[in-house]
């Protein structure tokens, strides 16, 4: 079946002297693995070799038998995200976003909302001026990815007893009142001080981080120190979900 769609390249691997195997995130067809025959030739139907973050209209054919690569026949590449290569902080954030998107999405499972969010993220992050801004936008995209794939942790209540955290108090107040909170990836959310002892796998989390995670709109105005703490928490969660650390995580654990 021949399909027309709009795509972002999440991964590209040379297959031979003239061809590539690519992983595309398409808006209406979801994640698609495809063979791009002849893409590395000087003259091809792909406007040259397909690179990571190539964006544009595609035509591909999905074979009837499952598990096989689609055949990519056309890719009208647009220079939409080329500024990423001139901004190391933005490039690392984009590479991390692409890796997680590929890992968490199933083949041929459409997520048009996430496609739009990734497009907006790449447009925004390539214009960032420093590491703080790039990290803020990366975290915001990571949260949208977790929400869209159904594995966003609960940050407004204890997942064991339901204790509400609708309005986190000021820094330090939880512990002073004997109400420390912890985050457990395996339980997919927060644990209060009355429940946390029954769960060995957890990490302490302070009130300020809980408040930011419950109101992601605050991320662009969050200080770098807090952003790093949030990213460490998310990397821990991604590692538990994937059963191994993401490849790009090493660039954000500092």
Image (spheres, helix red, strand yellow):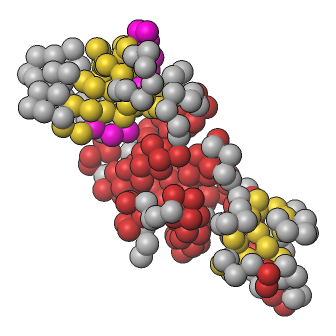
Expressed as whole percent of the image width and height from the top left, the position of residue 37 reads 20, 21
Instruction: Residue at 42% x, 49% y: name it.
Output: 99
- Dividing the picture into quarters, in which one does residue 10 lie? top left
- Residue 55 is at least partly visible in this image: no
Residue 190 located left or right of residue 162: left
Expressed as whole percent of the image width and height from the top left, the position of residue 179 reads 86, 83
- Residue 38 is at least partly visible in this image: yes
Reply above or below: 140 against 225: above
Expressed as whole percent of the image width and height from the top left, the position of residue 216 reads 67, 54
In the image, 6 versus 131, the foreground residue is 6
Reply above or below: 238 against 126: below
Instruction: Residue at 10% x, 23% y: name it.
Output: 41
In the image, 233 versus 227, the foreground residue is 233
Residue 167 located left or right of residue 155: right
Q: Is residue 9 magenta?
A: yes
Q: Is residue 84 magenta?
A: no
Expressed as whole percent of the image width and height from the top left, the position of residue 36 reads 25, 24
Instruction: Residue at 36% x, 22% y: name it.
Output: 70
Residue 149 located left or right of residue 198: left
**Magenta-highlighted residues:** 1-12
Judged from this view, the residue extending furthest toward the front is 65
Magenta stretch, main secondary structure, is: strand
Instruction: Residue at 56% x, 30% y: name it.
Output: 109
Name the image quarter holding the N terminus: top left
Reply above or below: 37 against 206: above
């Amino acid at each position: 079946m021949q399909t027309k769609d709009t795509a972002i390249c999440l991964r590209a691997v040379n297959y031979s002297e003239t061809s590539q195997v690519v992983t595309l995130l398409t808006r209406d067809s979801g994640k698609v693995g495809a063979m791009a025959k002849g893409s590395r030739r000087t003259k091809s139907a792909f406007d040259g070799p397909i690179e990571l973050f190539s964006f544009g209209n595609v035509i591909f054919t999905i074979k009837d038998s499952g598990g096989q690569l689609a055949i990519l026949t056309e890719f009208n590449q647009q220079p939409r995200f080329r500024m990423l290569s001139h901004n190391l902080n933005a490039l690392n954030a984009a590479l991390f976003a692409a890796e997680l998107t590929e890992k968490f999405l199933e083949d041929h499972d459409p997520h048009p909302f996430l496609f739009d969010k990734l497009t907006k993220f790449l447009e925004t992050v390539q214009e960032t001026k420093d590491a703080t801004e790039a990290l803020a936008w990366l975290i915001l995209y990571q949260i949208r990815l977790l929400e869209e794939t159904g594995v966003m942790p609960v940050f407004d209540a204890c997942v064991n007893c339901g204790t509400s955290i609708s309005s986190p108090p000021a820094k330090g107040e939880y512990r002073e009142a004997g109400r420390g909170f912890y985050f457990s990836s395996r339980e997919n959310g927060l644990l209060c001080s009355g429940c946390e002892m029954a769960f060995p796998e957890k990490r302490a989390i302070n009130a300020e981080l809980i408040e930011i995670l419950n109101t992601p709109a605050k991320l662009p105005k969050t200080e770098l120190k807090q952003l790093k703490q949030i990213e460490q928490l998310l990397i821990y969660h991604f590692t538990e979900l994937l059963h191994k650390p993401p490849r790009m995580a090493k660039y954000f654990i500092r």
